Image (cartoon, helix red, strand yellow):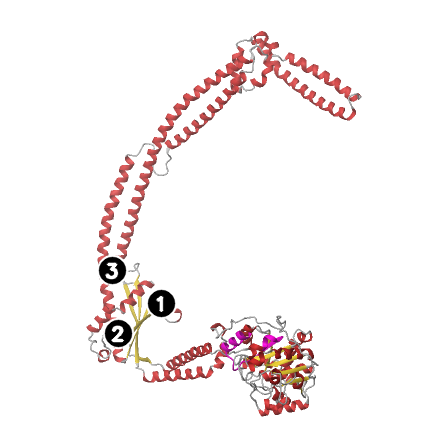
Amino acid sequence: MTGSTSVTQHQPNRRGGSTGSPRSGLGLPLRNSVEAINLPQLIARQRWLILFLGSCGLAMGVAYATHAEVLYESQAKVLVAQRSAGLNNSGTGTDVVDEDVLANHMGLIRSRKIVSEALAEYGLMELPSLVAKVSDETDQVDYVIQNTSIGKGGDGSARSAAIMNITLQHNSPEDVQKILAAIMRRYERFIVSQVESVMGEAGRMIQDAKRALEADLQEAEEEYLVSRQNAPLFFQGEGSSNVYQDRYRRLSEELLELDIQQSTMRTRLDRVRESLKHIGGGSDLSDHLDKLALIDSDSLERLGAFAGLQVSASNSAEFKAAMPAKMEEARAQVTRLLMLNAEREKLTAVFGSGHPKVREINNEIQLVEDFVRKSKEQTSPEMAFGSQAIKPDALLRAYIGFIEHDIAAIGERRKELIALTTDAESKAKELIEYELKDLVLQKKIARHEAIFDGIVGQLQELNTASGLSGFLYEFLEVPRLGKRVWPNVPLCSLGGLVLGLLCGMVLAVGNELRDSRFRTAQEVDEAIGLLNLGHVGQMSAIDQGIAGLVATDGSSESEAFRLGRTILLPDIKSKKVRSIGFTSSMQGDGKSTIVANFAQAFAQVGLNVVVVDCDLRRPSQHRYLSLQDQQGMSEVLQAKLPLADVIQPTEIENLSAISAGKTPENPAELLQGVNLDKAIESLSNHFDLVLVDLPPVLAVSDPAVVLPRLDGAVLVVRVARIRREQLANAMQRLQSTGANLIGSMLNVVGADKEFDAGVSQYGYYRNDYTRSSSQRKRGRAASATGSVNNAA
């Protein structure tokens, strides 16, 4: 490049880079949550604290066991059972008591009444070992109760046995035996006396209840006898039928049938009267057969008898004898006539009216019609009866009279049924009332009998149990000389150790929650929400110059830069990204080292790359790239030198650089000026990629001024030093400037082992398949020399 290079105003790229964008905004977690704690990793990090507190707890447990008061324990076992009421005095059968009874006995032994009476009766109140335990809040009785424990059940398969295990702990082996023995003897005497007293009182109460129930039962039986004597004649006791109720049901059904008949007759009467209006006085009977069909069969017989009075017996007999045959014959001919008419219509439709078959059918129809006409004349009532035949209107009037007479008869019968139904209902209710009263009296007698039988049974059991002394008390184990039970050195030691470890875990969790450092690369990625371009570990020192860059060797660090190059390369080749700025949160994060190595990595693939050191306050690129720093970007921004004069070639092919130059007094103002835009624009036009080294974003405002004018920004994070609050502030500043954040680079030097996973994934490239002999020698020399701290 020459000094005549044209420089145009650079317009900052505001597009969203395709290679990465913030995902989480400013919502960065400031501390770990309890759910996010990895317990094995926490124990590994805080192991010395946990082990120290565990050791302290173990020592305290041993010290307590050495200096604690020695306690001795005496034990007694008692079997509590109830004698079977079905055996005589010579028997030994027992019934196991239930849980409630056993619990009552356990509470009785630890009661203040039993303990105080036992100590007083046997003169144990003044034992020196007991007197020494007396205080303002506790006396001898309270002390004994507090140190007495009672369990139930046996050992092994006898766990559910009705056995009480009584234990007492005290600091004297002889005194603990005396105290427990006194308590057990007092308990036994108390139980015996109470059983005898309670049984005597219970017997008296049961006898009184028996006499009262006998009187009540006799009174109930007499009341039931009087009720049966006054019962109605038809009441036969429980299970008998209610004759009045059956009678009421039958009468109600008959009344319903009468109502239906009456309604039917009234309807028929209205229809007959309506038909009578359409019949003339001299009309023929055959003309009104449809109206005469209203007459029902029963009324028709009565009308026939009525009509028989007007004709002779001979005429009536001939007519009746001839009528069925003639009527049947006429019906057959009419049916035949209908069939012929249908056949004629069908043939006419097919052949026409002049067809021979049609004419033949017409002739046959004519013959049938003549026959039907003659049959009608022969079956006419006038022919049979002559002038004496009854007219249709006369028949209907007679039928109306019959219906009116029947309706009147039904009405009279209905009145009789209503009276009978009312009487049956009243008597049925009276009988039901007697039935209910009888049932109540029977239940009353049954209840009294059941209670009486129960009381008699209890009285018998009480008398038998009284003879058997009620309960069986069997001392399976009497109190013996106390055995030492406390302190237990192994138990105290284990308890102290567990308590110490628990305290250590609590403090470890507290330290973990207060520690705002990042533990894994995933936490960093989730916190900043940027595309991870790679993890780098140990890199060369600044005084090694360009020979110390690692981007070209076969180490895992070089593969990290190649990975970042692969991610960014598509946008760089497509000209979407021409200039990239690198910044970090704080000084010493290794951003300058990463810029130099990225420049070497991009130049390695044939890109024409230029590195611009815009860290005017603490420049370092000239040392990494082995350049002179007498003049550089500072002079360009002050317009003292043209841009082409400060571009320096490096020993690396395709890589040029612009050092920072002399440190100015106002670096922020220079970077904010228009000369920087012109320089970036000119460099972008003449180089494939411009890499800009910027100061830390939390230290100065320079990155906030420069990054919005570049195509992309990369944040370098040194996870061993950065805190969540610092990273949150850095992200907030970068996002507030509108910079296009395209990714992040993690410097894991000095970080926890969890970050090694991000570096060791390239461990394949450390082997001899991808390294030359000179590289292997250099690698062995580097490992022998040790780690060197990075410089910003």
Q: Residues within 10 Å of mark 2 (few under 14, many from 20)?
A: many
> Can residue 92 be seen in the rendering of this structure?
no
Please tell me which residue lies in front, 307 or 566: 566
Judged by depth in the image, the label closer to the viewer, 1 or 2, is 2
Labels 3 and 2: the sequence-earlier one? 2
Q: Is residue 440 left or right of residue 208?
A: right
Structural distance between the alpha carbons of marks 3 and 1: 25 Å
Kindly identify the amino acid type of the residue bearing the numbered disc 3.
Ser
Q: Quadrant of the N terminus?
A: bottom right
Q: Quadrant of residue 434?
A: top left
Q: Is residue 336 left or right of residue 792?
A: right
Residue 200's place in the image compared with 595, above or below, is above
- Measured along the vertical axis of the image, is residue 253 above or below residue 454? above
Residue 707 counted in the magenta span? yes
Residue 228 as seen in the image, left or right of residue 321: left
Q: Position of residue 357 (x, y in %)?
A: 78, 22
How much space separates mark 3 and mark 2, taking CA atoms?
Answer: 34 Å
Q: Would you name the residue on which mark 3 appears?
A: 466
Tell which tag, 3 or 2, sits nearer the viewer. Answer: 2
Q: Residue at label 2?
A: 144
At horizontal 76% and vertical 25% (from top left) the residue drawn is 349
User: SS at mark 2?
Assistant: helix
Q: Looking at the image, can residue 363 be seen?
A: yes
- Name which residue type carries label 1: Ala
Q: Is residue 359 above or below residue 490?
A: above
Identify the magenta region: 706-734
Cα distance between the residues tagged 1 and 2? 26 Å
Image quarter in which the C terminus is found: bottom right
Residue 645: percent from left, percent from top: 66, 86
Q: Which residue is mark 1?
A: 161
**Which residue type carries mark 2?**
Val
